[in-house]
Amino acid sequence: MMLLRGPRLWLPRRPPTPSISGRSGPLPSTPQVVHVKLCGSPQYYRSQLYSTAVPPDEVTVNYRHGLPLITLTLPSRRERCQFVVKPLLSTVGSFLQDLQHEDKGIKTAAVFTADGSEIAGSTLMEILLMNDFKLVINKITYDVQCPKKEKLSSEHATEMENMKSLVHRLFTALHLEEFQKKREHLLLERIDHLKGQLQPLEEMKARIEARSEAKTSGLLWAGLALLSVQGGALAWLTWWVYSWDIMEPVTYFITFANSMVFFAYFIVTRQDYTYSAIQNRQFLHLFHKKSKQQHFDVVQYNKLKEDLAKAKESLNQVRRSLYLPTQVEDLNEKN
């Protein structure tokens, strides 16, 4: 029997069946295979036995109707599940959340680049699918190979960019007012919440300020009383006890001592010696002292005030952008 050589598996040729008009003889009931021999490279025949089916645990990425389709095996149910991805809207974080929502057995999930760098959750899926990546689910790593998309021509790419820009402008025009109203409502709620937090602090601050102001005023009146006593003492010593010739040097040295005190105050505080500066400094000193005694958190109060000011400023901006077109239309109608 002869065997054909070629690029495929060699099969024996069936013996020819004699015709009726030929020589008579016994016909075999079934064809018999005498011998089969593989010729050529054995690696070739081994490759023909491999299946093209996807392994059950492999993660694949395909495109269907222009959208990426990620297929993977859920760890808990051991079932293949397909996830449709919207590249321009979905992010890596939302994709991982969808995985955990679909299979509660997924405790940890992360995406890494081919060289092992972790990809942030805010990365768009469109950027992720440009290159191969690694998907780690419950400490099991899956190598994901992304199919290469055909490179668009420059004209087609320009048309796509113009289409994206047009869709974005249309979405903004149709949903801007709704978004602004929703943001206004959120800002109003935040302002009310901040005011509720500030109310007890404002009451405590008012009490501390009143006490500090009263004590500061008392110290100023005490300073005036001391100066009055000093002037009266110098007058009494000058006209009733001693003469001016004796008291003149004394008053000179008192004036020089006062100048030294003023200069020392400037060196310590780096402020001019003025009565208003002294009053403010003494008020702040007493205020912080009493704040510590009554456990008034000055840092938290300042932070809440700053947040409230920012929220009010944002609210004014939102209202200007929300109601300005209406005001412009009213003015145009009047004109």
Image (cartoon, rainbow, N blue to C red):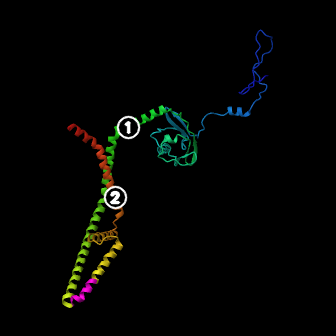
Residue 227 vertical placement versus 196 (above, below): below
Residue 126 vertical placement versus 286 (above, below): above
Which residue type does callout 2 highlight?
Leu
Q: Nearer the viewer, residue 159 or 142?
A: 159
Which residue type does callout 1 highlight?
Arg
Give the percent coordinates (x, y) of residue 94. 46, 44
Q: Which of 268 and 170 is in front in this view?
A: 268
Which quadrant of the structure image shows residue 134?
top right
- Disc 1 element: helix
Question: Residue at image x 22%, y 82%?
Answer: 231
- Report whether 136 appears left or right of 231: right
Q: Name the residue under label 1.
A: 169
Give the percent coordinates (x, y) of residue 144. 57, 41
- Disc 2 element: helix
**Residue 92 lies in the magenta stretch:** no
Q: Which of marks 2 and 1 is in front?
A: 1
Q: Name the residue under label 2.
A: 304
Label 2 vs 1, first from the N-terminus = 1
**Residue 248 lies in the magenta stretch:** yes
Which quadrant of the structure image shows residue 52?
top right
Mark 1 closeness class: few <14, some 14–19, many ≥20 residues within 10 Å = few
Range drawn in magenta: 242-252
Give the percent coordinates (x, y) of residue 53. 61, 34
Residue 232 vertical placement versus 319 (above, below): below
Q: In which quarter of the image is the N terminus?
A: top right
Give the percent coordinates (x, y) of residue 22. 79, 10
Residue 317 vertical placement versus 260 (above, below): above
Mark 2 closeness class: few <14, some 14–19, many ≥20 residues within 10 Å = some
